[in-house]
Amino acid sequence: MTVALSVRGATKRFGAVLALDSVDVEVHYGEVLALLGDNGAGKSTLIKCITGVHRLDEGEIEIDGRPAHIASPAANFYAGREDAVPRWLPRPLRVLRRRAMTDATVDVLDRLQVSLPARSAVVGLMSGGQRQAIAVARAAAFASKVVILDEPTAALGVRESRRVLDLITRLRAEDRAVIVISHALDHVTEVADRAIVMRRGRKVGEEVPSPESQQRIVAMIVGTAA
């Protein structure tokens, strides 16, 4: 498989705290990579460096084999993209642009089989699973290469988690590279092709998630692996 994202020697310090210690990670197109570890393991710091929230002190990030210089987090869907509809446009053209954005959004939701009560439904009144599915679809709409999901099934029931896990599987089928941070090993086992375990800012191991490997993964997470 072709490498979509490569992180090499990622190092990040916050004062005297070494949050990332020479971490190497890569994810391929058409692959779901799980990023595992206890709280404080460095997962979120790594993702924030990848997405431009933090700048690496050392190391490099490549997308499609080319150096990536990510200066700020990317916006999702049209939130924060109000400039896509210039205020100086005549009102009929602004309406047409809004219609085009609506059609594009519906196309993404339909392609990923995200079902909603109605196009005009208020997100805040939807179920947790529907809101999370929309959040995943928003990420997929603008992330043409790598989709990063942080605890996508947290606080969801069985049925709602099923909706999100199916969506992750469809993203892989679309040949996206997907990184999932999760504490739910059963979900990781179901959808992830590989799992990388971090502990105290370092990558401590890698496994193919399966019922047989769960014990080894847990041992790496808590630091009892041989």
Image (cartoon, rainbow, N blue to C red):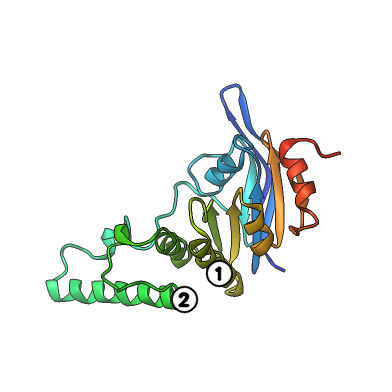
Tell me where residue 106 sits by quadrant. bottom left
Disc 2 is placed on an element classified as: loop
Q: Earlier in the sequence, mark 2 or mark 1?
A: 2
Would residue 5 be visible to someone looking at this image?
no
Tag 1, which secondary structure? Answer: helix
Up the image or down, 198 lies above or below 62; here it is: above
Q: Residue at x 62, y 58 (%)?
A: 187
Residue 172 coordinates in the image, percent (x, y): 60, 69
Between residue 137 and residue 75, name the one nearer to us. 137
Horizontal side of 148 relative to 33 (left or right) equals: left
Q: Toward which corner of the image does residue 210 lie, by quadrant?
A: bottom right
For residue 77, the mark is: none
The picture places residue 171, in percent across and down from the top left corner, at 56, 69
Name the residue rendered at 42%, 78% in the picture: 110
Is residue 119 left or right of 221 when viewed as pictured?
Answer: left
102 displayed left or right of 170: left
Query: What numbered label is drawn on residue 166?
Result: 1
Q: Position of residue 17 (x, y in %)?
A: 61, 25
User: In the rendered structure, which amino acid carries the disc numbered 2?
Assistant: Gln
What kind of residue is marked 1? Asp
Which of the 4 image quadrants contains residue 39?
A: top right
Give the number of the disc on residue 113: 2
In this view, 64 is above or below 108? above
